[in-house]
Amino acid sequence: MYQYDQIDQTLVDERVAQFRDQVARRLNGAISEDEFKPLRLQNGLYLQLHAYMLRIAIPYGTLSSRQLRALAQIGCKYDRGWGHFTTRQNLQYNWIRLEDAADALADLAKVQMHAIQTSGNCIRNTTTDQFAGAAHDEIEDPRVWCEIIRQWSTFHPEFSFLPRKFKIAVTGSPNDRAAVRVHDIGLRMHRNAAGETGFEVIVGGGLGRTPFIGKTIRDFLPRQHLLSYLEAILRVYNQFGRRDNIYKARIKILVHEIGIETIRDKIEAEWQAIRDGALKLPQEAIDQIAAHFAPPAFETLLGGVAPEYANAFRTDFEFGLWARRNTFKHKQPGYSIVTISLKKEGEPPGDMKAEQMLAVADLADRYSFSEIRVTHEQNLVLPHVKQSDLPALFKALKAYDLATPNVGLASDIIACPGLDYCALANARSIPIAQQIALRFKNWERAHDIGELKIKISGCINACGHHHVGHIGILGVDKNGEEFYQLTLGGSADQDAALGDILGPALDTAQTVDAIDSLVETYLRLRRNSDERFLDTYRRVGLQPFKEAIYAAA
Amino acid sequence: MAKAPKLKDQAHIVTANHLTSGDVVYLTVRNDWSRDIAAAFVAPNAEAAAAWLAEAEAQAARNIVVAPYLVPVDAGTTLPWPIQFRERIRAAGPTTEKAAGGVA
């Protein structure tokens, strides 16, 4: 993992001191709310529906056990003993007091954490594949590039007041687990004909009220030019992005309005002027960052399945279910990647109690080189677990209600905080997710249905990524009451697509029943159990699903 | 400066967030703030509501609360009952099971 140097630590410590002074001046009336609001937002402190909410940055979703313990302790000391993992691999505390906010940030700084780049019209926390550095299908560890982007973007003076927020995601695998095609900039690492590693650069993707799949602006960008090319994109956006209308200010609108060819010309022209300047990355600098992400001291294990694992798989049915859904192939023989579901049926997706955080920190120390990852699908990951340790890990997770075997299934739902917490929401998300998850609690049915990504947003801002759900659910307000519009066929993967609207919005009870009907329709239409919901939808189209929901009306 | 939207001539209460804690609060008949919506003073019509909001804004300027605004309520109930679903959640706290025990 990346470790702060003195410059990083000083920067974060000074930021805490600055914010402490700003809070004191707000509390004694020296500055007004209008003056204070942008300052608190730059430190991740929002005023939500019920209280202040503090959003903590977890750069590229990577945590140490020490950091997770600190998050648990901060949750107990300043909040209500739990936290909520978000779709940007961050963590939110929902009940922070203004007078405690600087102390919470000071405690975070002690473990090299902060709330910078979690709000405001700046380059936000870069996200990536939660399996980075571990996945068998990875070309290169994307965290190296995320850290390079972090160092370039944090407090970048030219890009601190962009037309609107700006989100970058990186994948080092051809199997996109970072949703790069729905980001302002998506970076997909791949090899060119000469075998060199570089980036496909994708711009103008995004969700929100005007969703777009990003367009490729450059097929192959050599690694040493990453920062200069990003700088060129940001400069063009900063100059030409709209500032007259908040809803049309993202780069996706600029790309849409002036066209990919025009914006490419502008970016390439800008890049030609700066490409060999100060931002050109020397190999030594890349190597220096990469050294922080060197693989841990894996044991050399024989190929094949560890006997402890094979035995438990045969004899323990629950373990077998969990191992099938919640583990992923590691690049190192004898190791697996474990996803810890934060989607126990009936619980708010992404919520985690402090005692669970402490337990996972201990398990990371024991089984995964003290490393934890946060996924944009609101789960946690232990990236490096010996297969022979999987049965013991499963047992330990189960004791903390953290062994739900549902990763990628219908109950593994992304849900934004919705109207239960968010000041912008029109409808609740979490209770709908809870009801749907309970509807699909039967393991036999859930596993038979197979991969099904349900994503719920409580408003058009789409923090729950509903546009790219196999089934998307958008909460809307109709005369003060909650209704839900369904979309089908979205995907955030390498085959990214936006969902199609199914029909008129439904009330809460109808919505949960409708999800059931859609699934039953899929089960009736699928060719075989290998054909996923998304595949069936793409083959048969909207109509049979539409009829299943609206024919009786 | 943009003109304030015309108020519907109906009952309103005033709500805000407490500056220090962030808690949801309501302006009471004693001209102070309560976390309990039952203690909120109900302004019976638009004219009274506008005057009541002006008082709340003065308190915001004195750094007691943040961002006060009017909430239309059903005056036919014993206790103020917000007409908008959003405000009912805001008054009662999150509806999710985990948070239910912790609502102030």
Image (spheres, coloured by chain):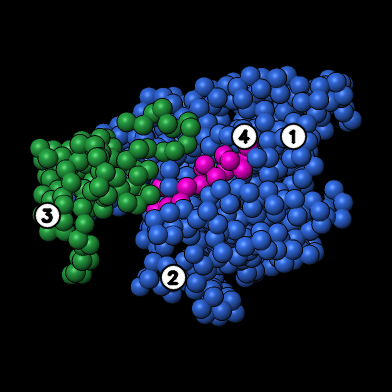
Chain colours: A blue, B green
Give, as a three-letter code, the residue at label 3.
Answer: Ala
* Residue A464 location (% of width, % of height): 54, 51
Give, as a three-letter code, the residue at label 2.
Answer: Lys
In this view, the mark in front (2 or 3): 3
Give me the C-alpha separation between circle 3 and circle 1.
58 Å
- Report the chain holding disc 1: A
Q: Are marks 4 and 2 in contact (CB under 8 Å)?
A: no
Give me the C-alpha separation between circle 4 and circle 2.
38 Å
Q: Are marks 2 and 3 in contact (CB under 8 Å)?
A: no
Residue at left offset 84%, top offset 25%: A313
Residue A443 is tagged as 1
Mark 4 and mark 2 on one chain: yes
In the foreground, A147 or A421: A421
Query: Judging from the image, what secondary structure is the residue with disc 4 in?
Result: loop
Give me the C-alpha separation between circle 1 and circle 4.
11 Å
Mark before the other along the chain sequence, 1 or 2: 2
Mark before the other along the chain sequence, 1 or 4: 4
Let me know if residue B9 appears in the view. yes
Q: Which residue is mark 3?
A: B48
Magenta segment boundaries in residue numbering: A422-438
- Report the chain holding disc 3: B
A504 sits to left or right of B14: right
In this view, the mark in front (3 or 1): 3
Give me the C-alpha separation between circle 2 and circle 3.
39 Å
* Residue A206 location (% of width, % of height): 55, 62
Q: Quadrant of the N terminus of chain A?
A: top right
Label 3 Cα crowd, 10 Å radius (few <14 / some 14-19 / many 20+): some
Give, as a three-letter code, the residue at label 4.
Answer: Glu
* Figure check: A203 above or below B52: below
